[in-house]
Image: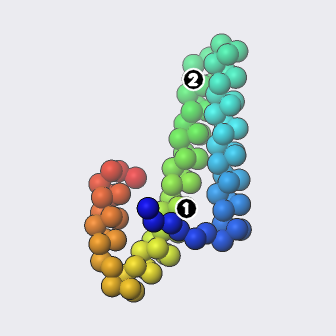
């Protein structure tokens, strides 16, 4: 299993985003429990999905700028296959 070192500041930013997404999901849960109107719930779900996609882009960007660059500089071109597979899974 590989590991990626992340600076504390970056981890804090990621955790902040994750906490915000968790809050959004809790809001959806409350809306369902309160029998809110479906389009209101769907709008909140769309916001959750967009937040997750944004988080995904931040992590992918960090991976490309750090992990991938380092591996290529060290001659490990298998990382390109890894990226291709990630993209095939439709990020």
Q: Residues within 10 Å of mark 2 (few under 14, many from 20)?
A: few
Note whether 29 is above or below 19 in the view shown.
Answer: above
Residue occupying the point 55% across, 61% down: 58
Element carrying mark 2: helix
Q: Residue furthest top?
A: 35
Residue occupying the point 71% across, 53% down: 16
Q: Residues within 10 Å of mark 1 (few under 14, many from 20)?
A: few
Find disc 1 in the rendering and name its residue: 58
Q: Position of residue 82 (x, y in %)?
A: 33, 64
Element carrying mark 1: helix
The colour scheme used to paint the residues is rainbow
77 on left or right of 6: left
80 on left or right of 32: left
Note whether 82 is above or below 44 in the view shown.
Answer: below
Q: Give the camera-side residue of 23 and 68.
A: 68
* CA–CA distance in space, label 1 to label 2: 29 Å
Residue occupying the point 53% across, 68% down: 4
Q: Position of residue 2 (x, y in %)?
A: 45, 65
Residue occupying the point 58% across, 47% down: 51
Q: Give the camera-side residue of 2 and 67.
A: 2
Note whether 65 is above or below 59 in the view shown.
Answer: below
């Amino acid at each position: 299993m590989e590991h990626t070192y992340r600076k504390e500041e970056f981890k804090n930013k990621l955790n902040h985003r994750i906490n915000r997404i968790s809050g959004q999901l809790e809001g959806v849960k409350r809306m369902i429990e309160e029998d809110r109107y479906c389009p209101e719930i769907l709008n909140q779900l769309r916001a959750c999905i967009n937040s997750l996609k944004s988080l995904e882009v931040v992590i992918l960007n960090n991976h490309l700028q750090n992990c991938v660059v380092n591996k290529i500089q060290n001659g490990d071109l298998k990382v390109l296959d890894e990226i291709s597979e990630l993209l095939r899974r439709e990020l």
